[in-house]
Image (spheres, rainbow, N blue to C red):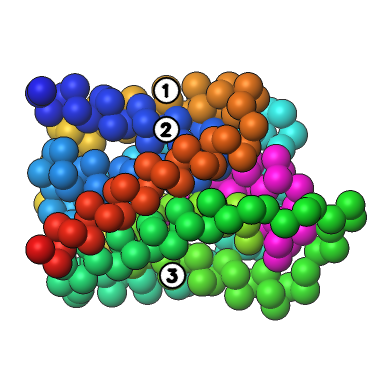
């Protein structure tokens, strides 16, 4: 199968996850770029940030039109992650490829297991958290984004629900704002490593991801959030297991 078809297919799946779940696209994009398109781990995480930035910004527009974005809460959460994302992006360039692969696989596995856990019964009246907790959660997410090249939506959504106190649909829309800000910041910190990226593959990948994000938004309206999360989590566990086996093998 040609590299173009692989890039289009992987991009479409990445966008579908982002549009439907408000996150998770990057944890599919990075292994796809490494194992399907032959990117190094460092180049894959940089390219993933490009793909996730343009895709999440596109999906953000769709969610904003339906009033599903809480701009003030999202801005506070994202602002707290800007510094850590920049530092993490600079640090990632000094880490060995094998360590990045293992760390990414472990993070993907943890995220999948969290998705498979039964959700706690939602509160009838969520109480917004203190600013210090919101800032702490945002800073932690920014650091993960910078080091591993993930947008962090699969971590942002539960944080926005449990820490900030948003409803699920608002959390999904708001997470796209956080992902966009964190990804742009981490990408700026990696500007020096962008020359190693094969842009001829990233372009089709990103284009297909943008289209997939719109389809993901429509899919989310037809299937329950629980069903989508379980399907995605099972795929994520398989990806994590493969990456770990490859890294230690």
Say if 54 sits above or below 150 in the image.
above
Query: x, y (%) of residue 115?
Result: 54, 52
Q: In terms of secondary structure, where does tag 3 sit?
A: helix
Position of 129 with respect to 195 (left or right) is: right
Quadrant for the C terminus in the image: bottom left
Disc 2: which residue: 15
Please check the rendered image and state whether residue 169 is part of the magenta-colored stretch, yes or no: yes
Say if 58 sits above or below 246 in the image.
above
Say if 15 sits above or below 150 in the image.
above
Q: CA distance from mark 2 to mark 3?
A: 23 Å
Position of 142 with respect to 247 (left or right) is: right
Task: Characterize the local packing of mark 3: few (<14), some (14-19) or many (20 or more) Cα atoms within 10 angstroms.
Answer: many
Query: x, y (%) of residue 163?
Result: 70, 65
Q: CA distance from mark 1 to mark 3?
A: 28 Å
Magenta region, main secondary structure: helix
Please check the rendered image and state whether residue 149 is part of the magenta-colored stretch, yes or no: no
Of residues 64 and 175, which is closer to you in this image? 175
Quadrant for the N terminus in the image: top left
Q: In terms of secondary structure, where does tag 1 sit?
A: helix
Q: Quadrant of residue 110?
A: bottom left
The residue located at (32%, 31%) in the rendering is 11
> Looking at the rendered structure, which numbered label has been put on residue 143?
3
Q: Which residues are magenta?
A: 160-183
């Amino acid at each position: 199968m040609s590299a173009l078809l692989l890039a289009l297919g992987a991009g479409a799946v990445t966008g579908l996850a982002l549009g439907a779940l408000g996150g998770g696209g990057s944890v599919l994009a990075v292994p796809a770029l490494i194992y399907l398109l032959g990117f190094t781990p460092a180049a894959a995480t940089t390219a993933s940030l490009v793909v996730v930035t343009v895709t999440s910004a596109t999906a953000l527009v769709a969610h904003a039109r339906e009033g599903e974005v809480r701009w003030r809460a999202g801005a506070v959460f994202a602002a707290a992650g800007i510094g850590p994302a920049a530092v993490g992006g600079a640090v990632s360039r000094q880490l060995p490829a094998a360590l990045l692969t293992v760390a990414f696989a472990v993070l993907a596995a943890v995220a999948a297991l969290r998705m498979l856990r039964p959700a706690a019964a939602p509160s009838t009246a969520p109480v917004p958290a203190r600013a210090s907790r919101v800032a702490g959660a945002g800073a932690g997410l920014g650091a993960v984004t910078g080091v591993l090249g993930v947008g962090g939506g699969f971590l942002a959504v539960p944080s926005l629900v449990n820490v900030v106190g948003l409803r699920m649909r608002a959390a999904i829309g708001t997470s796209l704002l956080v992902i966009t800000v964190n990804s742009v910041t981490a990408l700026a910190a990696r500007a020096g490593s962008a020359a190693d990226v094969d842009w001829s593959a990233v372009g089709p990948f990103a284009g297909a991801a943008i289209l997939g994000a719109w389809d993901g938004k429509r899919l989310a309206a037809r299937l329950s959030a629980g069903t989508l999360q379980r399907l995605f989590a099972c795929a994520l566990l398989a990806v994590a297991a493969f990456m770990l086996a490859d890294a230690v093998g």
